[in-house]
């Protein structure tokens, strides 16, 4: 009888009951992201608390006056939590970029955050001194991004511009040097800079351009992008952003 009772209880439990359990994986990611951020910002906890309290106080007072306590206060708390999470996400992103900046392959890792509508190819050209040129293709055309020694990288970019100009057709070619010196773009601002470039070609032109570029790439070796602490894939960079 006891065995049958246990069987009935087991049958009554939905097979997907574990899905209703707390999302421990997500909570763990947030915890790891917090630890990552705290290495670069020791007061992150107090800052997030301050944001939450300030937003909750302002919206809570306004909600209490105009909507009443039963609607205004809960709405204010949820809004404060949302704003705090947005601020936290930006702090995590900043800490992740700080962790990779200055290391070989940092620009490649940052560019991999470009998603739909962009084709990113790390290391289309390189030197033995780890000067590298990465290529991004999108609606703005061809974007060549160099990282390494500024003088050597600019020479390498000039060579690559000439090679790409043979197959670029009407697509414009933009050169960017990643770095912290004057005239260079910091890695943390690289994706934003690329996204702000004006759109010059149509999606169909981009498809034709990528086909021509693949033929160009087939004629040369792959660059030895540094591995180790710097992720060189979109998944790896997003994991770092999440503290994983």
Image (cartoon, rainbow, N blue to C red):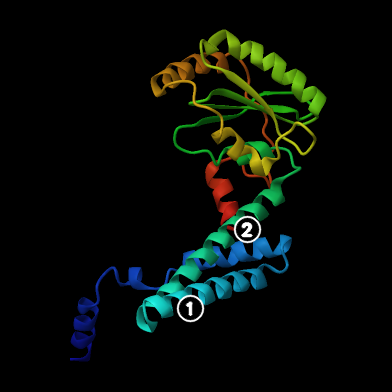
Give the residue furthest to the bottom: 1
Mark 2 residue crowding within 10 angstroms, few (<14) / some (14–19) / many (20+): many
Q: Is residue 172 left or right of residue 156?
A: left
Pick the residue in front: 175 or 132. 175
Say which of 127 and 95 sits in front: 95
Depth order, front residue of 107/235: 107
Vertical placement of residue 233 versus 20, above or below: above
Residue occupying image coordinates x 66% and y 61%:
37
User: Is 71 left, or right, of 38 in this rendering?
Assistant: left
Residue 71, horizontal then vertical, whole percent: 36, 78
Image x and y of residue 111, in percent: 59, 37
Q: Is residue 12 above or below residue 99?
A: below
> Going 75% across and 36% down the picture, which residue do you hit?
179
Residue that label 1 marks: 61
Q: Which mark is residue 91?
A: 2
The residue at 68%/41% (across/down) is 187
Give the label, 2 or 1, closer to the camera: 1
CA distance for labels 2 and 1: 28 Å
């Amino acid at each position: 009888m006891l065995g049958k009772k246990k069987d009935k209880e087991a049958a009554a439990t939905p097979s997907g009951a574990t899905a209703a359990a707390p999302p421990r994986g997500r909570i763990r990611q947030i915890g790891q992201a917090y630890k990552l951020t705290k290495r670069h910002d020791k007061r992150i906890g107090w800052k997030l608390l301050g944001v939450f309290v300030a937003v909750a106080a302002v919206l809570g007072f306004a909600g209490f006056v105009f909507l009443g306590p039963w609607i205004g206060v809960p709405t204010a708390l949820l809004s404060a939590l949302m704003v705090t999470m947005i601020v936290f996400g930006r702090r995590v992103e900043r800490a992740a970029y700080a962790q990779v900046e200055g290391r070989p392959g940092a620009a490649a890792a940052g560019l991999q955050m470009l998603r739909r509508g962009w084709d990113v190819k790390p290391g289309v050209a390189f030197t033995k001194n780890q000067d590298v040129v990465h290529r991004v293709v999108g609606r703005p055309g061809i974007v060549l991004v160099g990282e390494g020694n500024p003088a050597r990288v600019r020479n390498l970019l000039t060579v690559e511009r000439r090679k790409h100009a043979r197959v670029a057709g009407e697509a414009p070619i933009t050169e960017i040097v990643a770095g912290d010196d004057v005239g260079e773009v910091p890695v943390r601002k690289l994706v934003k800079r690329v996204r702000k470039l004006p759109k010059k070609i149509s999606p169909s032109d981009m498809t034709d351009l990528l086909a021509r570029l693949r033929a160009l790439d087939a004629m040369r070796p792959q660059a030895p992008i540094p591995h180790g602490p710097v992720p060189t894939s979109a998944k790896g960079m997003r994991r770092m952003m999440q503290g994983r």
